[in-house]
Amino acid sequence: MDKISARKLVWEKLRQVAIPDSRFHLDFDQFIPDFNGSDRARDNLVKLDLYKSANTVFVTPDNCIEGLREQILLDGKTQIMPTYGIRRGFVVLSPEDVGEGMARCSVSLDNIEKAGHYVSLSQIRDNHKLDMLVTGASAVNCAGVRFGKGHGFFDLEWAMLYQIGAVVDSTKVIAFVHEAQLVDVKLEVDEFDTVCDYIVTPKRVVHVEGHRKPACGIIWNKLSDGMMNDIPPLQELKLIDP
């Protein structure tokens, strides 16, 4: 099955469990929604040994991960998040940036850029070791093949982080999804698709083995029109690792 067909299949089911966004309603082309039971998925994730041992967690700005972003702060860990569409680069947020009782409001998309501070790729490379990455998805199968809204941002983020050495092949990637987004179909895989090591839902944790992650970095000639102008970290990467 191709990705467009899989999205349509999932989105029909997702409408039954998704929480509408105040900006985008249920337009899944524009955002990855929170869903009923995301708190249970969070609880399943934080029980994993790789989470317990992590110091710095990379998280995406997806609605479903807001509760996890709060938990990361409460657990005394640092998080790095790309801004929406990576248009303002990356933000780092540590527990010491947040006042007592302010964790919940600090991790919302409206506030996290104010509570944390922007960080360049070179600063990530020099100051942070990413222990794991957590991303939402439009759909993911049991082989760990996932994709988002169709813009390729997470694969782009992996490629940039891999190219600067902030992640390696053994860095674990977790898809954070509702059961409705976990599909039992074979999905096409491109050379730049970042396959997940774990899939966490409100009901279970699926451990995926036997795959390798992309090691190609940014494939410059495959960037969509406008990406170089719209995404400052790509401009930085071109300068530090042309």
Image (cartoon, helix red, strand yellow):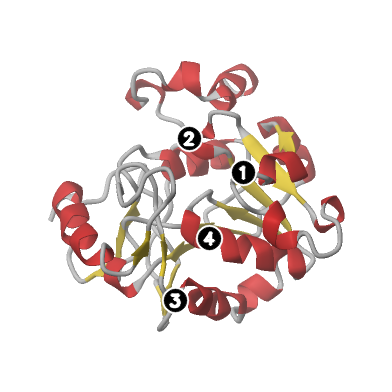
Q: Is residue 185 left or right of residue 77?
A: left
Q: Nearer the viewer, mark 1 or mark 3?
A: 1
Q: Amino acid at mark 1?
A: Asp
> Residue placed at 54% from the left, 36% from the top?
160
Which corner quadrant of the image does residue 190 belong to? top left
Q: Which mark is residue 37?
A: 3
Q: Are marks 4 and 3 in contact (CB under 8 Å)?
A: no
Residue at mark 1: 110
Tell me the residue that label 2 is attached to. Answer: 85
Residue type, numbered disc 2:
Gly
Residue wearing tag 4: 65
Residues at marks 1 and 4 touching, judged by CB atoms closer than 8 Å = no
**Residue 167, image x, y percentages:** 60, 49
Secondary structure under badge 1? loop
Give the distance between the C-alpha atoms of the residues marked 1 and 4, in whole angstroms: 14 Å
User: Gap in Å between the C-alphas at discs 2 and 4?
Assistant: 16 Å
Q: Secondary structure at mark 2?
A: helix
Q: Nearer the viewer, mark 1 or mark 4?
A: 1
Query: Mark 1 vs mark 3: which is more N-terminal?
Result: 3
Tell me the kind of residue under disc 3. Gly
